[in-house]
Image: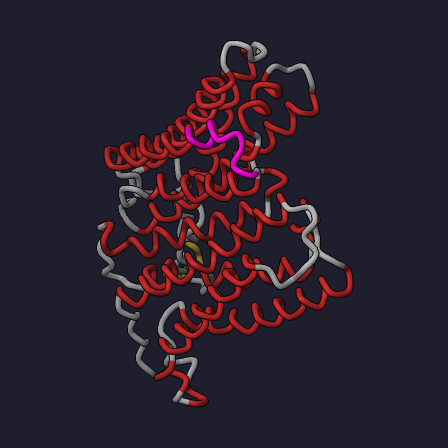
Amino acid sequence: MPATPAPVPHRTDLVTTLLAGWFTLGLLLDSWAHNNLPGLESFLTPWHGVFYSGFAATALWVLWTVRHALRRGRGAWQAMPPAYGATLLALPVFAVCGAGDWIWHTIFGIEQELKILFSPTHLGLAASMFVIVTTAVRSAWARPDAPGVPTRLGPAMLATALGAVLVLLFLQYGNALAFGEVGVVVALSGREVGVMADLASSVALTGLVLLVPLLTLARRWPLPFGAATVLAGVAGLLSAAVTGFNGLAPIAGVVLAGILIDVLARVLRPAPQRRARWRAFAVLAPLLTWSGFLVGAYAAAGPQAPPPSLELLTGLPVVQALLGLLVAVLAEFTTAPAPAPADADPAGVATATPAATVPR
């Protein structure tokens, strides 16, 4: 049986993630352009240049990283470093979708606003890009002895944030961070049911995008200090770019809450094996996030803001805390128990042992 290939060195994952950051920065610039330049009618733009040059640099680096495996010919896949095989497959998918995007724009024109998020070529770009930018997470996950220290988990931490912000970008119609302080205070005044429902559903969706990556990291390692702040900061940067850098106070509140969540993680050290701490973190993290969001919104809106509905103001963070608890409990079920051994009775009938205990 062939030996399992060794993971790439830490510095290789670091370079991969930095190039993925360049790649993602180009996407943020392109998102800003599509949402704030209504006269945009050309595929050949500076932000597309940053975006596709970031892809080219990342692709060349990945090909260089797996060059020894590729020389194996038919045995290349078995010799591929962990995580980099999927990335290698995603590269041509992205390239084909990029070419398709150029053809799409030539025939149908440049999409604007929410239509960007449903373009078939854009969805193909997003799916393949997600595989590429999260390479360092999968690579670190493959190391059984990966130390839980920020200097070693930095690439995985940043790659997790890049993957999360990509998901949030393509769920932009449900991004609560794009509301701005005016949108938040109007929604929570309860005067317009549609606006209120829009904010509530957006907060629920955005809350999952901000919490699930942290719980994913905490399942594998002690959550590195800075993970929540980096995640909130990158998500905030995306949201600010989409809105033309207007209404930044709620975003600032979420980023400050990220610092408190990092302190909370350092104190609790959440892990599925420590269920009380794991669940406490999943409850308190969204409570801090959305409390900071509301504090930032109302601090910027000032005394002239319409008074909020008390139920909406107090209940919004609590609902997110309960959703966090639900996610934490569900995450405890994700590892299936091993098949129960069978004991043969005297008649030759197999009797299964009792099922595994359900998490409490």
Q: Which residues are magenta?
A: 244-252
Residue at the image position 60 percent from the left and 42 percent from the top: 172
In this rendering, the answer to whether 90 lies above or below 290 is below
In this rendering, the answer to whether 235 lies above or below 342 is above
In this rendering, the answer to whether 203 lies above or below 70 is above
Figure label count: 0
- Expressed as whole percent of the image width and height from the top left, the position of residue 1 reads 34, 83
**Residue 274 belongs to magenta span:** no
- Expressed as whole percent of the image width and height from the top left, the position of residue 323 reads 49, 32
Q: Is 325 in front, or is 113?
A: 113
Query: On the image, which quarter does residue 125 sit in?
Result: bottom right
User: In which quadrant of the rendered image does the C terminus lie?
Assistant: top left
Residue at the image position 61 percent from the left and 21 percent from the top: 187
- Expressed as whole percent of the image width and height from the top left, the position of residue 327 reads 47, 38
Judge from the rendering whether residue 102 lies leftward or rightward of residue 225; answer left or right. Answer: right
In this rendering, the answer to whether 223 lies above or below 287 is below
**Residue 251 belongs to magenta span:** yes
Residue at the image position 51 percent from the left and 9 percent from the top: 303
- Expressed as whole percent of the image width and height from the top left, the position of residue 263 reads 27, 33
Query: On the image, which quarter does residue 13 sit in?
Result: bottom left
